[in-house]
Image (cartoon, coloured by chain):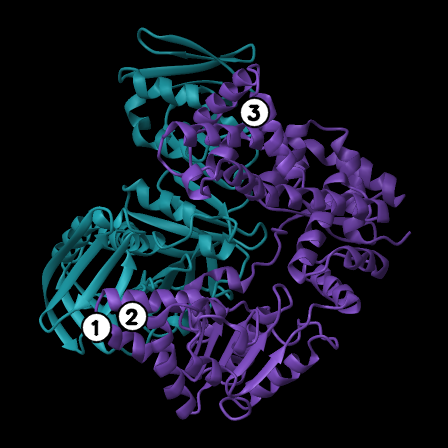
């Protein structure tokens, strides 16, 4: 009978486990393995001489019995000291050694760029093909092909992935290239910080000396004049110096409100490409790629079923993870009913996430106050009343926890919320009050 | 068994053995000391299946034999009773301990259940003087990782070096810092084919802490893959680490752009003082190298900041770098010499520390990248 050593040993250990106490099994047998089984000799590895001594002295017969039974011969058992720990991974040796392999990877040469966001890991279909091809062209001919490259599309279509893929690709081809990947919010922070510390020179130097500047979600610079001015100058200098600029946004440059004309025309001066939301086939392909990343075997059928339900890529990954977790915790295979079950839970939760604001808005419009007032500190009688009604409704209608309600209502203590809910419950007995509440809830149902 | 000995002879030895007792084994016998009286000696040993320690003291053996007793109780009792003659004897599975006024009875587990700490000595690889252990081993072992999940980093590499008068090179690293000492135990001949081995740092820490005796003999048994340290009447045994030690040669900087010579005590106390603030700010200590001084500083947004000038002899360009205060203090507290040399090339490259007048030692620390 030919069996894999490891498999055989698992079976034998299973047998031994029933013969010895749990303590003994864990301390002595858990770390053993069957190295070889040849010509009636079983070679067993154990991590230390002390363990071997105990195994030999006290458990030889038990081991031999179990081995004999499963190999069907009169086996001889020998022990060797050997640690059968998984191989140590060179990456786990720490930063000192990563540094050694690639001396130019000073920590944070490509800060914030995910290593696994590459062109290879991006699923391509008709909805993003143009963007994909232009990104590849740009990364091969930086500063020459299309400058700037402006990518736009709704959330979760893979803009960030594509831009980071460019960063990774450029870096892989030439480690000497200086690449800065930044979100427009961080860019804003840098500008603000530079103004605050009166040290704009350093910031200017940082951004104006790069080979590739990638700014994600550029639409957020809208309305920030000083940031736009800084961006404008940086932009001009980089384009003149043939450095590549890559921008992303949720809409085309012309539609970004409160963006200076001179900037929006410059943004559109290179190539503007859009990514459409992924179609069904692409979503299925994305799921299969993601599943592979998590080392999970997902069938095409299952992927299709998820892709039908979820429409944006982030939702896809989330749904996939929920399904994997669920199937692992329950210990069942992925089936269409499991997927259905998990995904319908997801829907329910999303509604829950979305409604508190709506509810507060309705209360505010009913009492003609502002949401900031209801979340604020003021304790005028009419505000307190509206606030307590909000507590009550958030509890009764949405079944949020007291702590959650406290957070929603401007970081109040959970005991305050408990008090508020009780107070309203008491008032409900009064005439006229419950009608008032009902009118508000009917607003919610609209 | 029946034997008697003087409790003062046991002294620190039993504390050493106690370190090898398993802290929470599910196997009761591993929570015990093995006591064996044989040939005019009382042997006490303990193991947690990873390391094993055995000590012996001279005793008056009337009847040879052995037994195991609960280690914690036995240890606590012996450290708390007055000095003097102690008699041990077994009686119906129990061990009776008697001194002038004390009579104690211990529950026992038969000695057959206790694992042998070592089978055979193996081959003698080296004899290292005690002062080398305390001076050189101690300078290296502190850089090893405490995490046994990363086997190679939790060990100390001992590698035979050609030239340089024979000796060994010792290296330990936890991935953030590295300590290296060359020419250890110079003149030792080793007939072995294997020219390097990785020893668990834990056993080296124990070995350093023994702090007595003249020299230590190192034996390696290929058969059982064990390394044994023999010192007078003490034996420390441990399994060798099989994982491959990271290639440290590559990361030792060959060049520097700034070199600072500074008094160890001055810089140590400056770092210590600044670490008061660094504690609150990710332990970041900044070194700014000026023309003729090294400025040590730390700041915590919520507390304030501290800047200390340390006089120094500076060669090369002015420079800045930041380190974790713990790594700096670990290094300073493990060397005794008075002057240290600090070399660096830039804020992102590892900093190198050396001892003035000693080109056999170096310590490398990975800097912290601070936001400019």
Question: Which dot, 2 or 3, sits closer to the camera?
Answer: 2
Is disc 1 surrounded by few (<14), some (14 to 19) or many (20+) residues within 10 Å? some
Q: Look at the picture and state if B302 lies above or below A147.
A: above
Please indicate, yes or no, whether residue B215 appears anywhere in the rendered image: yes
Q: Which residue is mark 1?
A: B319
Q: Colour of chain A?
A: purple
Quadrant in the rendering for residue A258: bottom left
**In the foreground, B1 or A111:** A111
Q: Colour of chain B?
A: cyan
Q: Look at the picture and state if A72 lies above or below B262.
A: above
Quadrant in the picture for the C terminus of chain A: top right
Image location of residue B39, percent across then percent down:
44, 29
Q: Which residue is mark 2?
A: B347
Quadrant in the rendering for residue A383: top left
Q: Residue at x 36, y 46 (%)?
A: B205
Q: Which residue is mark 3?
A: B28
Q: Residue at x 78, y 52 (%)?
A: A5
Q: A289 left or right of A206? A: right
Residue B248: image tag: none
């Amino acid at each position: 009978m030919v069996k894999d050593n490891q498999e055989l040993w698992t079976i034998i250990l299973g047998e031994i486990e029933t013969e010895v106490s749990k303590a003994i099994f864990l301390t002595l047998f858990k770390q053993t393995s069957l190295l070889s089984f040849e010509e009636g000799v079983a070679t067993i590895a154990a991590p230390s001489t002390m363990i071997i001594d105990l195994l030999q002295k006290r458990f030889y017969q038990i081991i031999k019995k179990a081995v004999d039974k499963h190999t069907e011969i009169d086996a001889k058992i020998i022990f060797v000291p050997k640690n059968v720990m998984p191989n140590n991974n060179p990456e786990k040796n720490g930063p000192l050694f990563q540094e050694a392999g690639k001396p130019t990877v000073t920590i944070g040469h490509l800060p914030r760029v995910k290593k696994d966001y590459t062109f290879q890991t991006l699923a391509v279909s008709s909805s993003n093909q143009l963007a994909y091809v232009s990104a590849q062209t740009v990364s091969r001919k930086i500063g020459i092909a299309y400058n700037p490259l402006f990518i736009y599309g709704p959330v979760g279509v893979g803009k960030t992935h594509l831009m980071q893929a460019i960063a990774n690709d450029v870096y892989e081809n030439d480690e000497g290239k200086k690449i800065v990947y930044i979100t427009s919010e961080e860019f804003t922070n840098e500008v603000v910080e530079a103004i605050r510390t009166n040290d704009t020179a350093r910031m200017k130097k940082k951004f104006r000396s790069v080979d590739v500047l990638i700014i994600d979600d550029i639409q957020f610079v809208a309305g920030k004049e000083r940031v736009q001015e800084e961006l404008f100058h940086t932009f001009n200098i980089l384009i003149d110096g043939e450095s590549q600029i890559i921008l992303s946004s949720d809409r085309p440059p012309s539609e970004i409100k409160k963006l200076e004309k001179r900037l929006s025309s410059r943004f559109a001066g290179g190539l503007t490409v859009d990514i459409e939301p992924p179609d069904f086939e692409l979503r299925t392909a994305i799921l299969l790629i993601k599943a592979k990343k998590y080392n999970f075997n997902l069938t095409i059928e299952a992927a299709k079923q998820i892709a039908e339900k979820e429409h944006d890529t982030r939702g896809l990954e989330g749904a996939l993870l929920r399904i994997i977790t669920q199937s692992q915790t329950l210990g069942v295979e992925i089936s269409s009913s499991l997927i259905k079950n998990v995904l319908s839970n997801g829907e329910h939760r999303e509604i829950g996430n979305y409604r508190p604001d709506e509810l507060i808005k309705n209360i505010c419009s009913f009492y003609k106050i502002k949401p900031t007032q209801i979340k604020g500190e003021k304790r005028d009688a009419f505000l307190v009343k509206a606030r307590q009604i909000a507590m009550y409704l958030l509890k009764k209608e949405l079944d949020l926890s007291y702590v959650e309600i406290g957070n929603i209502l401007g970081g109040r203590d959970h005991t305050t919320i408990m008090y508020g809910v009780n107070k309203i419950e008491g008032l409900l007995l009064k005439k006229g009050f419950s009608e008032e509440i009902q009118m508000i809830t009917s607003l919610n149902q609209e | 068994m029946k034997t008697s000995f003087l409790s003062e002879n046991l002294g620190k030895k039993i504390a050493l053995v106690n370190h090898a007792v398993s802290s929470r084994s599910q196997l009761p016998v591993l929570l015990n000391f093995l006591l064996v009286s044989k040939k005019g000696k009382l042997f006490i040993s303990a193991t947690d299946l990873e390391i094993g320690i055995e000590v012996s003291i001279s005793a008056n053996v009337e009847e040879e034999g052995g037994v195991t007793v609960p280690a914690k109780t036995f240890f606590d009792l012996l450290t708390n009773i007055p000095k003097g003659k102690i008699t041990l004897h077994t009686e119906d599975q129990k061990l009776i301990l008697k001194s002038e006024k004390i009579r104690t009875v211990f529950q026992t587990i038969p000695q057959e259940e206790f694992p042998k700490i070592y089978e055979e000595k193996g081959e003698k690889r080296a004899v290292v003087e005690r002062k080398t252990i305390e001076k050189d081993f101690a300078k290296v072992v502190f850089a090893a990782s405490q995490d046994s999940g990363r086997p190679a980093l939790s060990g100390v590499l001992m590698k035979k070096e050609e030239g340089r008068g024979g000796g060994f090179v010792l290296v330990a690293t936890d991935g953030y810092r590295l300590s290296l000492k060359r020419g250890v135990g110079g003149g030792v001949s080793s007939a072995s084919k294997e020219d390097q081995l990785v020893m668990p740092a834990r056993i080296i820490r124990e070995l350093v802490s023994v702090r007595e005796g003249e020299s230590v003999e190192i034996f390696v048994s290929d058969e059982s893959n064990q390394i044994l340290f023999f010192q007078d009447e003490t034996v420390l045994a441990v399994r060798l680490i099989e994982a491959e030690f990271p290639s440290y040669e590559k990361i030792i900087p060959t060049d520097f752009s700034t070199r600072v010579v500074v008094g160890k005590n001055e810089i140590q106390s400056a770092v210590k003082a600044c670490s008061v603030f660094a504690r609150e700010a990710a332990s970041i200590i900044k070194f700014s190298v000026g023309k003729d001084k090294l400025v040590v500083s730390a700041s915590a947004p919520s507390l304030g900041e501290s800047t200390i000038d340390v006089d120094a002899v500076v060669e090369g360009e002015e420079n800045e770098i930041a380190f974790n205060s713990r790594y700096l203090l670990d290094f300073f507290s493990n060397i005794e010499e008075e002057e240290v040399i600090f070399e660096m090339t830039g804020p992102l490259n590892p900093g190198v520390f050396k001892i003035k007048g000693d080109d056999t030692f170096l310590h490398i620390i990975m800097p912290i990248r601070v936001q400019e």
